[in-house]
Image: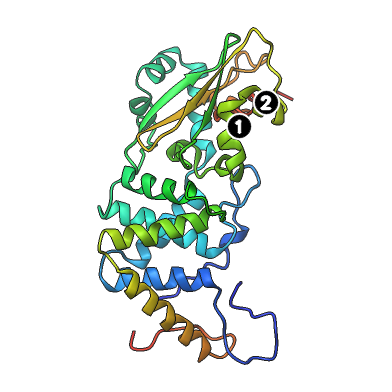
């Protein structure tokens, strides 16, 4: 931790600049009664442990096994996802886009880092990085190549730019050789990147 | 004020092997913004605009440094805490650290 000063010629504690800034901000806001420390800690804990890509994998696997749910998801993703208990705390509108042989969908947020938190948790570092945010729009096939995906020319690439109001969930194609699999088993094949569009779902091993 | 033990956070990982937060202050900055939003102190589009302004402001920083800077500015803009109050409180924490022997919890005076 940053409290541990690297030198031994000092006998008191040190805080990093960021530690000082965050302590100043939080202690002031708590003192003024705008927030409670326990509530802040609970938010962190929820995002660290309870919300993650498994939520999205559940949504995808259910859409693979239940055509009615898949239709609902394409028509009103916000409601379909909420029906599984994954409610967004930011109140944004969800849109599901399904990959096919004709179209591959890729999600980016060119503005900042808008991301479907309720189903994918917090975004990976590369999603927040300037190179991804600019290159995804200019050269989506190049980005996909960087991630190890080379699509045939006959597959169109559609890029979706997330905003504070609208977030996208990519429904990857169901892998071959999974006929008769349960939704639970299928969910294990749905990796995080496949729901952003930078990977395919895993193949059954 | 209580001083939550955040030392475990950097070891926690997402399903796919990447830590959500690199350092405890990043988690605190994240939690603060969400808590203020949930308390109705600003709307989500207001937050996205503030964060985007930092990210596109031409200054190279880590993502959560942008995040914290955006939060400090929005908090001042919403008159929840002024930049002057923040500076004063930062000084108070610096002083608190300076009078605290190694290994003891750092606390503000008169809290």
Which residue position holds label 2? A142
Q: Residue at x 63, y 48 (%)?
A: B18
Q: Are marks 2 and 1 in contact (CB under 8 Å)?
A: yes
Q: Residue at x 49, y 36 (%)?
A: A110
Quarter of the picture containing the C terminus of chain A is top right
The answer to which of A174 and A137 lies nearer the viewer is A137
- Residue A88 position in % (x across, y down): 36, 39
Q: Quadrant of residue B92?
A: bottom left
Is residue A120 shown to the viewer in this render?
yes
Looking at the rendered structure, which numbered label has been put on residue A135?
1
Q: Residues within 10 Å of mark 2 (few under 14, many from 20)?
A: some
B47 is higher (above) or lower (below) than A187: below
- Residue A168 position in % (x across, y down): 45, 28
Q: Residue at x 38, y 69 (%)?
A: A25
A189 is higher (above) or lower (below) than A180: below
Q: CA distance from mark 2 to mark 1?
A: 8 Å
């Amino acid at each position: 931790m940053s409290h541990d000063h690297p030198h031994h010629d000092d006998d008191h504690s040190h805080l990093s600049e960021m530690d000082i800034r965050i302590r100043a901000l939080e202690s002031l806001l708590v003192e003024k009664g705008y927030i409670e420390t326990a509530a802040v800690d609970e938010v962190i804990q929820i995002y660290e442990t309870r919300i993650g890509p498994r939520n999205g994998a559940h949504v995808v696997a259910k859409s693979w096994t239940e055509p009615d749910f898949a239709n609902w998801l394409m028509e009103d993703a916000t409601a379909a996802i909420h029906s599984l208990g994954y409610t967004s705390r930011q109140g944004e509108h969800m849109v599901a886009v399904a990959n096919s042989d004709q179209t591959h969908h890729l999600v980016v947020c060119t503005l900042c880092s808008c991301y479907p938190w309720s189903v994918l948790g917090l975004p990976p570092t590369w999603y927040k990085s300037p190179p991804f945010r600019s290159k995804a729009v200019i050269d989506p096939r190049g980005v996909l190549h960087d991630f190890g995906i080379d699509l045939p020319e006959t597959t169109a690439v559609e890029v979706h730019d997330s905003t504070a109001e609208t977030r996208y969930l990519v429904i990857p194609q169901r892998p071959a050789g999974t006929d008769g699999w349960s939704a639970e088993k299928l969910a294990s094949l749905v990796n995080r990147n496949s729901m952003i569009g930078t990977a395919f779902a895993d193949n059954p091993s | 004020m209580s001083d939550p033990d955040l030392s475990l956070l950097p070891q926690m990982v997402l399903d796919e092997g990447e830590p959500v937060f690199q350092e405890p202050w990043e988690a605190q900055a994240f939690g603060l913004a969400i808590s203020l939003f949930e308390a109705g102190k600003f709307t989500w589009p207001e937050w996205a605009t503030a964060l985007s302004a930092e990210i596109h402001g031409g200054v190279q920083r880590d993502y959560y440094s942008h995040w914290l800077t955006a939060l400090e500015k929005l908090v001042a803009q919403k008159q929840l805490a002024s930049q002057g109050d923040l500076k004063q409180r930062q000084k108070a924490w610096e002083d608190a650290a300076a009078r605290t022997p190694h290994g003891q919890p750092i606390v503000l005076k008169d809290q």
